[in-house]
Image (tube, rainbow, N blue to C red):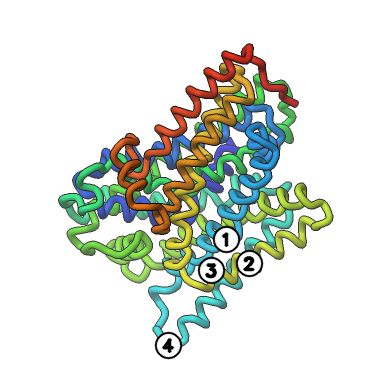
Amino acid sequence: MATGMMLFALFFGAGNLIFPAALGQQAGQSLWPAIWGFLITGVGLPLLGVLALGLSRAQGLQDLASRVHPWFGVLFTVALYLTIGPLFALPRTGSVAFEIGLSPWLPQQGRKLWEIGSLALFFAIALWLALSPGKLVGRIGKVLTPLLLLAMALLIASTFVAPMGQPAAAQAAYQAQPFVKGFLAGYDTMDALASLVFGMLVLMSVHQAGIREPAQVMRATFAAGLVAALLLAVVYVCIARMGATSLAQLGLLDNGAKVLSGVAMHYYGAWGGVLLGGMVFLACITTAVGLLAACAAYFNHLWPILNYRALVLLFALVSFAIASLGLGAILSAAVPVLVFLYPLTIVLIALAIGQALLGWGAVVWRWAMGATVLSALLHALHGAGWLPAALADGLARYVPGQAAGMGWMAFAAAGLALGLLHWQATGRKPMALA
């Protein structure tokens, strides 16, 4: 149970607070199809990621990704750790903690100095906690998570006892394909990416509890993942509903941070700010601690000459510097990176599970991932305006889901089919696993 609570706390960070709230406001009466899409990428995929890592018998994310190719393993893993670490997710935790917990109370004059000071304090606390990774379960799972859940329960309960209003008509972005829009909105949480990192922390925690037999390890891993997934699903739905019912009182707001602040102020006035600030700090600090520890551990393994404690300090400093640029800049810069990395991550999870169940060979991994990388590159080039218009129009016309940003699924399916045919034609040679 403690490991499951730890995993929930690690997943439930900055993105999990602001994105469901924004989704709820924009989806309105289309909330349920939108939140189902969000739950697939925000709950289902992280659970599958943790299970895939356990089923794969891999020694870590790089070992798993290297089943495509050793160079792919290194490049993909470095890109993923930097994304969920010091470049995007880590700075976002500190920035959201400031924007929701402290910013509403500050005058414009001198605000930047307050922001820098609060960010310095935030990352100093995360640094201290992350320097003792062996105590993560005790500090996060047993202490911080119950406090976080208590703060969440108080705010959410108020929205059920005295709803702010009824959901309004969906905004333009959610009118045509709310399920697809919710599915893509789940990318922003980065939880599927993080699951391939946090999964190793779960396995370490299970082993430290004295569980070694493979079947028992998988049962314990599944139980921890299920606890985290159920808690995440309940909280996501409640926050999204909170956003949907807030429109009548607050109007349509720019982002989820403002939605949460407005809801807290509506119900509790000044005390609402205190409640929300504590809730946000706990959510963000728990995620920051886990990300700092995981990123430092990986790069220490990749380059042993780099000391773990020095890496934790380095990543905390880099995260502090990027967080100082502001939440808007972080969120905008992350979008193209997530659009590229998420399809690769989803396919990697699917390949790991398929490998465990069907025992397919290395050629299947290479065909499926190669096709997905091609699709992701084309999508990234299109987003940057570098893809010829004729090619972009052709892809949108002939590739299912391309116009909605889901064309990578068709590419991955085609690559998987070709890989299976190749594997069959070459005698169904199994992959050699360590």
Residue under label 3: 323
Q: Which label lies toward us, 3 or 1?
A: 1
Amino acid bearing label 4: Gln
Q: Is residue 49 visible?
A: yes
Q: Which mark is residue 109?
A: 4
**Among numbered discs 4 and 2, the one appearing first in the sequence:** 4
Inter-mark Cα distance, 3 to 1: 9 Å
In screen coordinates, is 382 left or right of 145?
left
**Among numbered discs 3 and 1, the one appearing first in the sequence:** 1
Q: Is residue 225 visible?
A: no
Residue under label 1: 87
Q: Are marks 1 and 4 in contact (CB under 8 Å)?
A: no
Inter-mark Cα distance, 1 to 4: 28 Å
Residue under label 2: 318
Inter-mark Cα distance, 3 to 2: 9 Å
Mark 1 residue element: helix
Residue 203 in percent (x, y) is at 67, 34
Mark 2 burial class by Cα count in 10 Å: few <14, some 14-19, many 20+: some
Q: Which mark is residue 46?
A: none
Q: Quadrant of the N terminus?
A: top right
Q: Which label lies toward us, 3 or 4?
A: 3
Mark 2 residue element: helix
**Among numbered discs 3 and 2, the one appearing first in the sequence:** 2
Q: Are marks 2 and 1 in contact (CB under 8 Å)?
A: yes
Q: Are marks 3 and 1 in contact (CB under 8 Å)?
A: no
Amino acid bearing label 3: Ala
Residue 242 in percent (x, y) is at 29, 52
In screen coordinates, is 162 left or right of 90?
left
Amino acid bearing label 2: Val
Residue 103 in percent (x, y) is at 42, 74
Q: Are marks 3 and 4 in contact (CB under 8 Å)?
A: no
